[in-house]
Amino acid sequence: MKRVKIIARALYIICRILAVGYSLTTVYAAFCTLTGIWVSPDGNRLLHIFYPFTQSPFLIADNNFRYIVFSLLLPLGLYSVFFWWVSNVFKVFFQDRLFTVENIVHLNRFYLLNLIAPVSATLAGSFFVPVNSIIWELIVVHSILGVFTYFFTAIFKQGLDLQNEQDLFI
């Protein structure tokens, strides 16, 4: 179990860093597109968002408000939440007690996020921008991840029940 805790802690740190990175990117992209700072349209079709204080492109998006909202900011924001919540799932596995209500809450949030958010965001966005086939593949991957996490949640609920029964008899 020691190896699991080491791996879980390392993945927790990596996912937290990714969550912060995605969050900062989302905020930065929204700031740039709203203010026009560090942004340059490349013709009528593309919009370049530059690294701060440079003329080097950081993000390239279609120069269309709907595309920026539904194909840039929404996915970046959702992946910010995804990586934050997956870090909480990894945090579960390096705690002293695995079977706690708090850990089950983290697992519940994560499986619901994976089962609901990708489909909902894609369906909402499909009214405004075309959806590529790779997006549907990502939805399948997130759905499978959600189902596996649902199974873990059920196991953890059973473990919590057994642990509580044991605590009554000891």
Image (tube, rainbow, N blue to C red):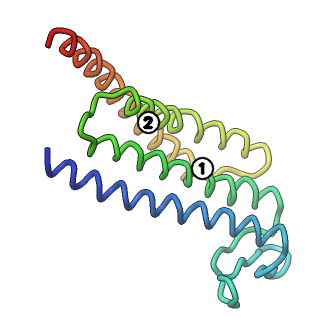
Location of the C terminus (image quadrant): top left
Q: Are marks 1 and 2 in contact (CB under 8 Å)?
A: no
Question: Residue 101 lies in what quarter of the image?
Answer: top left
Residue neighbourhood size for the residue with mark 1, other residues' Cα within 10 Å, grouped as few (<14), some (14–19), many (≥20): some
For label 2, the crowd category at 10 Å Cα-Cα, with few meaning under 14, some 14 to 19 and many 20 or more, is some
Is 161 located above or below residue 34 in the figure?
above
Closer-to-camera residue (153/42): 153
Residue at horizontal 55%, vertical 49%? 81
Residue 74: percent from left, percent from top? 68, 52
Q: Position of residue 115 (x, y in %)?
A: 52, 33
Secondary structure at badge 2 equals helix
> Which type of secondary structure does the marked residue at label 1 adopt?
helix
What quarter of the picture does the N terminus occupy?
top left
Residue 35's disc is none
Q: Is residue 21 above or below residue 147?
A: below
Q: Mark 1 against mark 2, which lies toward the viewer?
A: 2
Callout 2 amino acid: His
User: x, y percentage for residue 129?
Assistant: 75, 52
What residue sits 65% from the left and 88% below the top?
A: 56
| Residue where numbered disc 2 is placed | 106
Against 65, residue 44 (above or below) is below
Q: Which residue is mark 1?
A: 78
Tell whether 107 sits left or right of 82: left
Q: Earlier in the sequence, mark 1 or mark 2?
A: 1
Q: Residue at x 46, y 34 (%)?
A: 111
Between 91 and 61, the one nearer to me in the picture:
91
Q: CA distance from mark 1 to mark 2?
A: 16 Å
Horizontal placement of 124 versus 153: left or right?
A: right
Lateral position of residue 152 relative to residue 106, left or right:
left
